[in-house]
Image: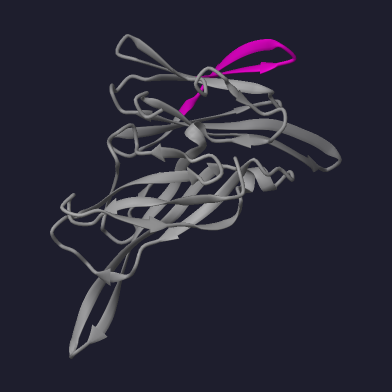
Amino acid sequence: MDHLPVRLRYASAQFFEAGGVSVSFTAVSAKVKNIAFAKDVAVLYAKGGVWSEEAMAWTANFGDHDLFAHQVQQQIEECVIRYSANGETYWDNNEGQNYRLATVVMRVGGNVVLNQATSKQGSEAGGGFVFTTSWLEGEIYVNNLSFAKEVGIHLTVDGGASWQDRGASFSGFATESNSIGGSGVEVWKFKTPELNIDESANEFRFAVFYRDLATGEEFWDNNFEQDYRVSKTDGAIVQ
């Protein structure tokens, strides 16, 4: 999946009533590798067998990747993401199966995707000194393929000299999914230990993983084979 420079972040069907009026739409978010300044990103979707295409708008840049988002003003049945840059066109079509929302109300690309990670700093006193502590915490979205699973991050705090796996814990269903009673996407939260800051590197570097223990399959979101990188500055964020 990560050999492609585009990944569906999520497609989420929404429905609510306000003032006696029923409102339905589909929120779509995608990540793309930052391979050129000019980017054309679109969602292609089907409803009742009819396919349409709508442009997605840029929402954020994180250096080596960008986020795009769009709201389709109806509940759709399936979708794919198109990304064009530098005269080339790339697709995330769920490996030819498309992302289908007929039986669940939310899907994420590649079965696992980083939602957000935030750098944190604190302080700890001991031996007459005050030490600066540092850790990383965040959320991972996974498609609920089976009950038995392992979710977490593969992380280095010292610029790649050493790596460690840190597990995440189940936190519930994604807000977008849970709001209309769906169970397609789970939220898993992680937090690394609060240790003395390692000043040999000024950033956290990591990827997220999802192991389906029922089938033995393993899925990764490693930011298009670049890994995610976020400054150790308190409050720094990557999505």
Q: Which residues are magenta?
A: 42-57
* Residue 29 image point, x, y percent: 51, 33
The residue drawn where x is 40% and y is 39% is: 220
The residue drawn where x is 28% and y is 76% is: 123
Q: Residue furthest right?
A: 20
Q: How is the image coloured?
A: one colour
Q: What kind of secondary structure does the magenta stretch mostly adopt?
A: strand
* Residue 158 image point, x, y percent: 18, 56
Judge whether residue 211 is colored magenta: no
In the shown orientation, is residue 49 left or right of residue 34? right
Residue 132 higher or lower than 219, as above or below: below
Picture quadrant of residue 90: top left
Q: Residue furthest front?
A: 215
Count the marks: 0
Q: Residue furthest left?
A: 200
Residue 27 higher or lower than 147, as above or below: above
In the shown orientation, is residue 139 left or right of residue 71? left
User: Quadrant where the C terminus lies?
Assistant: top left
Judge whether residue 44 is colored magenta: yes
Residue 24 higher or lower than 175, as above or below: above
User: Quadrant where the N terminus lies?
Assistant: top left
